[in-house]
Amino acid sequence: MNQPTPIQIVFKNIHKADSHTLEVYLQGDGYKSMAKALHRTPEEVISEVKASGIRGRGGAGFPAGIKWSFIPKASNKPKYLVCNADEGEPGTCKDRDILRFDPHLLIEGMVIAAYAVGAERGYIYIRGEFFRESQRVEKAIQDAYAGGYLGENILGTGVKFDLAVHLGAGAYVCGEETGLLESLEGKKGQPRVKPPFPANVGLWGGPTVINNVETLASIPAIIEKGGPWYAALGVDKSTGTKIFSVSGQVNRPGNYEVEMGISLRSLVEDYAGGVKGGWDNLKGVIPGGSSSPVLTRTACETVTMDYDNIARAGSMLGSGAVIVMNKSVCLVRAIARISRFYRHESCGQCTPCREGTGWLAQILTRIEAGKGRAGDIELLEELCGNISGKTICALGDAAAMPVAGAIRAFRDEFVFHVEHGRCMVE
Amino acid sequence: MPTLIIDDREISVKPGATIMDAAKLLGIKIPHFCYHPGLSVAGNCRMCMVEVEKMPKPVISCAMPVNEGMVVRTDSEMVRKARRGVMELLLINHPLDCPVCDQGGECKLQDYALKYGPDRSRFHEHKREVPNHDLGPVIETEMDRCIHCTRCIRFSTEVAGVEEMGAVFRGDHMKVGPFPNLRSLTSELSGNMAEICPVGALNLKPFHFLARGWELQRQEGVCCHCAVGCHTNVETMDNRIYRVKSRKCPSINQEWLCDKGRFAFEGMVEGRLQTPQMVPHGGGSLTEATWAEALDRAAEIIKGVSPEEVAGLAGDWGQGAEELYAFQDFLRHVVGTPHLDHRLTQRDFSADAIPLGRADLMLNTSLEAMERADVIFLIGADPRFEMPLLNLRLRRATLAGASVWSMGPGYLTTNLENVDQTVVDPGEECRFLHGVWKAMRTVGRSGVANSWAGAMKKALRPVVLLGRYAIEHPQAEKVRRLAVAILEQAESVEVGWKGYNRMHSAAGAAAAQDMGVVPHRGPGYKSCSRVGLNAKEILEQGALGKIKVLVLLGTDPETDAVDPYLATAAMGETQVIFIGAYRTRAAQMAQVVLPGLVHGERSATVTNVEGRVQRNERAVNGPLMAREDWRILRALSQRFARPLSYDDLEGLRTAMGREVSGYDPNVVGSMKGGLPCDHGSEVIRGLDWDPGSIATTGADEHHLILVVKPSFYRDTTMSRGSKTMAKLDGGAQLRIGAVQAKKFRIVSGGRVSIECNGHSAELEAVVDERVDGSILLGSGQELRQLGGDRNGFLYVRLKVL
């Protein structure tokens, strides 16, 4: 099997020895984009990013340039830039590689973003489990301060940006941007009611931009080579490259940076070494992290990995965590496991999510244990409808979507479980 | 003004308003659990979802700001479906046993379940079981029923300012409860948590399982347990009060009520006088009598001495304006004596010579305006435990950035922010305030007084509050004048702002002043030709036998007067005619006992600390034989040459309204809440004063100064009869500073005895580092045994037991 040479934007340095050091980073033209950006106006930087068409890589896929332009120019409160490095979506491990192998790329991207929106203070909110990663980032920040890439007067341009790391405590919900802000403020990580959105009222009440690690790490290349160059990569409204974390029953699981719009089959076969037992042994794929609905094999044949095409196939690109399942997998068991995760991670604040995730998990666990009741599947479907779109944050949707999606795609398997009290896979 | 359409009706609202606000204006009720107008928006229950055109998902109306041209539906199929979904989810883990729940019948969950809930459960898993908490005497918990709306949490942190409630764990393991290791809620407002709990999770412990909401009859009332005059709903059944709830009044109590206002009524029926009594001719003990016999006897006693030998003392807690007016009218015009007073707790009467007007005696900053204060001086005031609902206004001000400067003999356990506390030794108050006054006239010095002066100088909306300690201070008038003088020196005060406030917490004090139950002037602040003896002099002259008959109206001087031993002596030497409701010591020592009624048993006019005149109507009937106090006085006057001129309540109120402005019965009866701070006079300014100090404290190595902290929960006969108040009060305690504790080898929890003028009291000691040098801070009724003070301060000896 030949692995094609991928285009590498975010992962351009990670294969180098000691790629996390400032020295190696500078050898690869590090911080040149930043210097370039600081000599342009913030408006020019924002329009460059807008032109690139890059969409948020954390899961929601909101265009980053537009997000930046929401930040009010004048504000009587300080503005903040926050990097969301609380990579918690099951199956996702892309940001981790950026943090540990190329922290300077993230820092460079953050300085550019901060300059564009007028923030003088930034935070990198790293999930608690990434302890060693956070140490690497801390060291990189220290080196960047020493090298004049952060601080009061960056590269002598008079631009000011202070950056600090905040280590979370491992709650999935703190990956939700307002839950993250609450946690960053020292409170219990519970998402806020929106509106107001963070662009107006964010961290400590100030206008705040929150971007994913991968998004920010893509910024230096966009500034270096231009928005149009980036927009030419990928397809249509899904521009540039995306890192996919391929896991599950594949021969070479791992993070692969590819152009958007690659076919799922190519990603799995050409990059991840193919499905264990061959493509014909494929049962389904969860294409965008545990919160995205599972795709059947039929859908997997044709779907391409970009925001719109996956959405048309009935799922979503999400964070780019591709979980491949072959025919040895009991889908009921897999979904029950995912449901228990969401029950555990629900913050408990709002009714549909607090009560609904618990109920979903209990029903699914019961079905899995062979104690399903007639009507359980319909109840699950209705319950998913009562959770989706009714909660404060997207965690409710994240819990409901995989269940509803799995029932839609593999209903017979659920029915078999309920009727026979056992799995059809065994 | 954005205009929107809700359920086909158009409305314009102010920018920033939410859909919920707009719907409220239209009278459209949107179901909700977590939303509460007095709290921040949490948006967690999801019950108030509505459909907004062009929005794909239902939105929560409590948090969604309105936009121009919005089209909202509050009862579409989408909305009903969403609510049905939320209700089912709320009910899966909620017990479905409304018949045994204390909230049954007044539960929002129950009501909405009827409208939106499924008729049977689809939940076949295990229901969540949540352990209960012991939250002290006010709140009973059934945490299984909690729906996690967080109203109690938001109330305690945002409104009460005491962080005691929180939520631990996440998801469906989330548990609402008190902070760990909390033995009992400490907030004086904790009852509100049960009131705002939308389900049966937090209930009122004293009311628990006593009655159903629908069995109770509701009467609107005005709370008379302090001088704020909160609006209440008094709920009764079978001629008994079961529960008192807050009634919304934005300009007084907003939506809240303190625990005292909620439960002090329990003492209403304890130890009541049932029938008239009198000591028969020729002596003996008190025996039951008919009204006619008792009144004849009383008249005979009064007529048996010359008018100048009769004096009257009225209580300032439980009396309405009607009986106070009749009382002074009776003494002045029927009996013909000028000796009457209600100020039993006061030590300094020197201001009577001026005399003080209405503005000098009450608040000049209305409760509502207090929220806008930017600099607050607390002079011998503990607003939190004198008038909790006034304190809430101050708290709002401090949350908005106001600074608080407090001086007094002890520290305050306060829930205000930005408080700077200065402990001033008893007797040094004038010296300290004079220092502040001087500092305001000079510049650039440092020290505590200068920080005070600096703050006041810059203040735009300063508020000076004279509290109970300042009012009862032996140099009260000097302290008061200094406060006025300091306020006069403030340089940047907003035009029209009034910052001087004398904060008398007794519910009847303002009315007693208005009605002229004072020896130096008549009703309506009119001067009178003959100036009589004041409260202190009446007791002194009584003890000397110069006053021969004492007419008491709703007061027991032994518990109310500054010096209980002087009061006992006075009552022992005089013939006492007691008009009142409770079997107190005064009633036992009387020659004639005439049983009266208390608040809640009769229609009365009450005046709050702002001078706002309100009506408190009857909710229950008193003891069968008891009568309204004014009727007793009227009947008594019948036995004199010139009886009182009014025969009914209307006549009395008309007479009262004629003489005292603000009491016109047509106005009082029709107005909701009366006018605050409408005194018709200004604070007297620019008075000469001598800022001298009492020849200093006089504490030596054998003597310490005891400062008795008045009990908030048990300061009236009624509240002393309440079991809940007794539990909240915490009993007698003596707080001793670290230095003294070391010297006397006292440890916290140990028993000590304190002795003063040959009297002694025993109580529990608590070592408290915040107590200063030679001061002891005491609380509890036991300390009354120590008797009166010398120069206004109690010099005591301490002994370890």
Image (cartoon, rainbow, N blue to C red):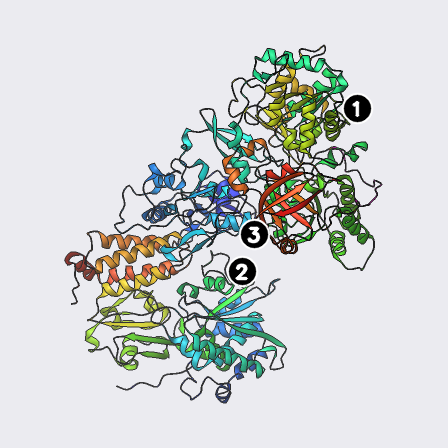
Secondary structure, magenta segment, majority class: loop
For image coordinates 61% across by 54% down, the residue present is B745
Quick one: label 1, few (<14), some, or many (20+) residues within 10 Å? some
Q: Name the image quarter holding the C terminus of chain A.
A: bottom left
Q: The magenta stretch spans which residues?
A: B680-694
Task: Look at the numbered discs 1 and 3 and tell me whether their residues touch, using CB distance below 8 Å.
Answer: no
Callout 2: few (<14), some (14-19), or many (20+) C-alpha neighbours within 10 Å?
Answer: some
* Disc ID at residue A201: 2
Quarter location, residue B319: top right
Name the residue that disc number 3 marks: B748
| A200 left or right, relative to B431 | left
Cα distance between the residues tagged 2 and 1 = 64 Å
**Residue type, label 1:** Cys
Callout 3 amino acid = Ser
Residue B259 lies in the magenta-colored region: no
Question: Residue beneath label 1, please?
Answer: B528
Horizontally, residue B332 falls left or right of residue B119, namely right
Q: Identify which residue, B616 or B120, lies in the foreground.
A: B616
Q: Position of residue A150 (x, y in %)?
A: 57, 78
> Residue B121 bears which disc, if any?
none
Query: Visible in this render: residue A398?
Result: no
- Label pair 2/3, CB-CB below 8 angstroms: no
Res B275 visible: yes
Foreground disc of the pair 1, 3: 3
Label 3's element?
loop
Q: Where residue A95 appears, x then y in whole percent?
A: 41, 75
The answer to whether residue A200 is left or right of residue A387 is: right
Task: Tell me whether circle 2 and circle 1 mark residues in contact (CB < 8 Å).
Answer: no
Q: How far is the residue under mark 1 from the one under mark 3?
A: 54 Å
Say if B389 sits above or below A51 in the image.
above
Locate residue B486 relative to residue A220 in the image: left or right.
Answer: right
